[in-house]
């Protein structure tokens, strides 16, 4: 998982995006945090956001990687 996070960080750094990963406890009795991953396209002002359980972080990274690739493709009009 650490390697996947490093790869994602590198992709984000090379792109025109910012990303935020935060941990939230949604309810008073919720013992399992939700991870909220937000990818922000700096040039277009678009925000992509996905929330899931902590143990689904792998899937969140996959989704955010897909968003960043789409943002990059849109930028170059491919």
Image: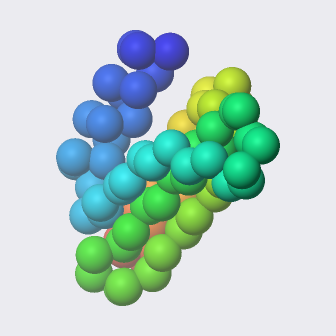
**Residue at 29 percent of width and 60 percent of height:** 18
Instruction: Work out whether residue 63 can be spotted.
Output: no
Q: Give percent across and percent down for residue 34.
A: 65, 44
**Residue at 45 percent of width and 48 percent of height:** 22
Instruction: Work out whether residue 10 can be spotted.
Output: yes
**Residue at 62 percent of width and 47 percent of height:** 25
Who is closer to the viewer here, 58 or 30?
30
**Residue at 36 percent of width and 85 percent of height:** 44
> Which residue lies most toward the right here?
29
1 is higher (above) or lower (below) than 41: above
**As drawn, is 78 to the left or to the right of 59?**
left
What colour-coding does the image apply?
A: rainbow
Q: Give percent across and percent down for residue 72.
A: 39, 62
> Which residue lies most toward the bottom here?
44
Q: How many marks?
A: 0
> Which residue lies most toward the left here?
13
30 is higher (above) or lower (below) than 70: above
Q: Give percent across and percent down for residue 19.
A: 36, 55
User: For residue 3, which quarter of the picture?
Assistant: top left
**As drawn, is 38 to the left or to the right of 12?**
right
Q: Give percent across and percent down for residue 46.
A: 45, 81
**As drawn, is 6 to the left or to the right of 28?**
left
Who is closer to the viewer here, 70 or 6?
6
**As drawn, is 45 to the left or to the right of 65?**
left
């Amino acid at each position: 998982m650490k390697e996947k996070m490093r790869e994602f960080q590198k992709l984000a750094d090379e792109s025109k995006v910012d990303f935020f990963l935060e941990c939230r406890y949604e309810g008073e009795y919720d013992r399992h945090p939700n991870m909220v991953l937000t990818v922000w396209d700096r040039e277009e002002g678009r925000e992509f956001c996905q929330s899931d359980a902590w143990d689904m972080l792998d899937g969140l990274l996959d989704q955010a990687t897909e968003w960043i690739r789409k943002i990059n493709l849109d930028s170059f009009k491919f």
